[in-house]
Image (cartoon, grey):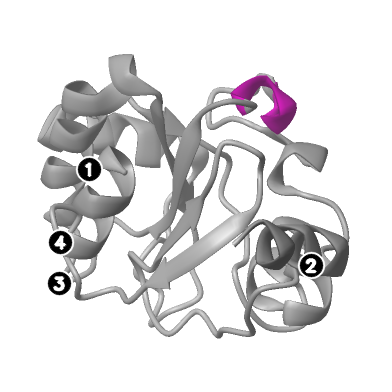
Amino acid sequence: MLLTTLNLAKAQKGTFHQFSMESIDGEVIHFSQFKGKKVLVVNTASKCGLTPQYEDLQKLHEEYKDKGLVVIGFPANNFLNQEPGTNEEIQAFCSANYGVSFLMMSKISVKGDDIHPLYRWLTSKEQNGVMDSEVKWNFQKYLIDEDGRLVNMVPPREKPYSETIINWVKG
């Protein structure tokens, strides 16, 4: 097990902790501040059939934030124009409809030619050392361990309280 972990660490080019981004309200967030915590990364959209997942993401945040879980939403308009709003509009929507208090970042692109560097790292085995993946739709989830390493990807339709996510959070 230790050898596998060491080989995995060597295969990675950096970690989640190397990134900094602007939050939805304009504050620069250095992801290095999440060292020692598990991070659930999810691309979000306000006009998607999966948008009600905000409710469970908020519950997950409230239930596990004091146990070392950080939930971070990344609004993206990559799928059928389902996140057309500005950062201000997205923030107002999330607050009014779902009481979102977990960290939300500025709107980014999660695929294509203008993919954000964080999502390039998340989706490229060459960079993350774990797996290649493609963001298939809104609310795809990435699990990041306490050391900033990618652990797994959870498909969009799998809910935040899925066995995969809860076992990882508690593990």
Q: Amino acid at mark 3?
A: Gly
Work out whether mark 3 precedes mark 2 in sequence or the reverse, and give the earlier one.
2
Discs 4, 2 touching: Cβ within 8 Å = no
Q: Any magenta on residue 33?
A: yes
Whole-Å distance between the Cαs marked 3 and 2?
40 Å
Work out whether mark 4 precedes mark 2 in sequence or the reverse, and give the earlier one.
2
Q: Secondary structure at mark 2?
A: helix
Q: Any magenta on residue 141?
A: no
Count residues near mark 1 (Cα–Cα under 10 Å), then give few for <14, some for 14-19, many for 20+: many
Q: Amino acid at mark 4?
A: Glu
Main secondary structure of the magenta stretch: helix
Quadrant position of residue 121: bottom right
On the image, the x and y values in percent for residue 4 come to 68, 67
Q: Which residue is tagged 4? A: 163
Count residues near mark 2 (Cα–Cα under 10 Å), then give few for <14, some for 14-19, many for 20+: few
Residue shown at 48% from the left, 40% from the top: 39
Front residue of this view, candidates 122 and 74: 122
Residue shown at 23% from the left, 52% from the top: 167
Work out whether mark 4 precedes mark 1 in sequence or the reverse, and give the earlier one.
1
Q: Which residue is tagged 1? A: 57
Q: Secondary structure at mark 4?
A: helix
On the image, the x and y values in percent for residue 135 come to 50, 79
Quadrant position of residue 5: bottom right
Q: Which residue is tagged 3? A: 49
Q: Is residue 30 left or right of residue 169?
A: right
What segment carries the magenta color? 29-34
Which quadrant is the N terminus positioned in?
Answer: bottom right
